[in-house]
Amino acid sequence: MSQSHISQFSDNYSSSVVEDAPLDHLSFLPSDSAQSVNPDVLYGQNSASMPDLTFVRAPFAAPPPEILQRVGLPRKQNYVLWTDMVNDEFVAWWLKTEYGSRMNRNIFESKRQAECWQHFNQVAAIQDGNPKAHLSSQQTAFSHEAWVERIITFITSLQLPFQLVEHPQFRALIEMARLAPSLPEIPSSDTVRRRLHELVMERQQSLLQKLPTGGKLSIALDCWTSPFRQAFMAVTGYFIDQDWNYREILLGFEPLHGTHTGINLGTVLFQLFQKHQIEGRVLTVTTDNASNNSTLVESIKDSLQALMMM
């Protein structure tokens, strides 16, 4: 995390949590109490006068007992939370840390009168006991009124239709969250994008497997341009499976670049056929009456014939 990000920690002492990167316990580093070295003596001609450099091992940080709660940044939790209920266990552990052994007294029971401290908890770094202030995550008590207000805020902020709350998929989402043993983690936008791509590929392959052996499918395609001037070609396949069920599959929603000539469109379409390995299983291609579509179909025929001759 860069120091430009706003951390959930607030500094209670000399350094902030944002600056507190985990350090390796390097036994060869001298401590603050190690003997200072005079460069003239160290690099002088008289080697017998060189001082005896003492390398001090950093004190071992005892792991906190399980009763103490760990807090901190996601997936790290490098800090231990102090509360009145676990004061004895916390102090007993903290006095054995590097900072605690220096202080040699309990500094966590002191009461702070400023109102701002109501939003912070006292914590100590697991590594060395460095005391910090941790922004408390105070959660609002659940009530039906607060729940409805939160839904209204969600809908109005994203300009979604009010009927969203009645959609079966929205209700299924809430029901699945209720089944989780703990509060489920909300995935990032990158995770949703990647998983959506994977799901589309999985569903396409699963549906194409229902195409009977020796069977063919019909293709329909259409090109259109978005309000942002980005052109796309939607390609849909249709077939009857071995149980005589009608099947539809979106084979691709391909972005188009360059001029929309029949040859260019045919190249995009043929590459899509190769991607799904259906080059020899196309029965018909249905398009609108645009003039470039005739060239597109001829381009596909030429590509298929060239493939068969290889």
Image (cartoon, rainbow, N blue to C red):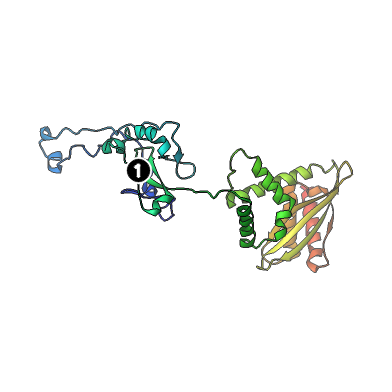
In the image as oriented, which residue stretches furthest toward the right?
244
Res. 243 visible in picture? yes
The type of residue carrying mark 1 is Pro
Within the image, what quadrant is residue 286 found in? bottom right
Image label count: 1
Q: Position of residue 53 (x, y in %)?
A: 19, 34
Q: Left or right of 34: which side holds 239?
A: right
Which structural element holds mark 1? strand
Residue 261, image x and y in percent?
73, 66
Please give the name of the residue rendered at 82% of the width and 48% of the height, measured from the top-left corner. Answer: 281
For image coordinates 75% across by 51% down, the residue present is: 273
Residue 17 on image: x %, y %? 38, 47
User: Could you say where residue 115 lies in the image, as x and y percent from the top left?
Assistant: 39, 54
- Name above or below for residue 37 compared with residue 252: above
**Mark 1 surroundings: few (<14), some (14-19) or many (≥20) residues within 10 A:** many
Res 61 visible: no
**Left or right: where does residue 265 sit relative to residue 10?**
right
Question: What residue is shown at x 88% (from left), y 41% (from top)?
Answer: 243
**Residue under label 1:** 131
Q: Nearer the viewer, residue 41 or 278?
A: 41
* Residue situated in front as seen by the camera: 224 or 104: 104
Quarter occupied by residue 31:
top left
The residue depicted at 79 percent of the width and 52 percent of the height is 304
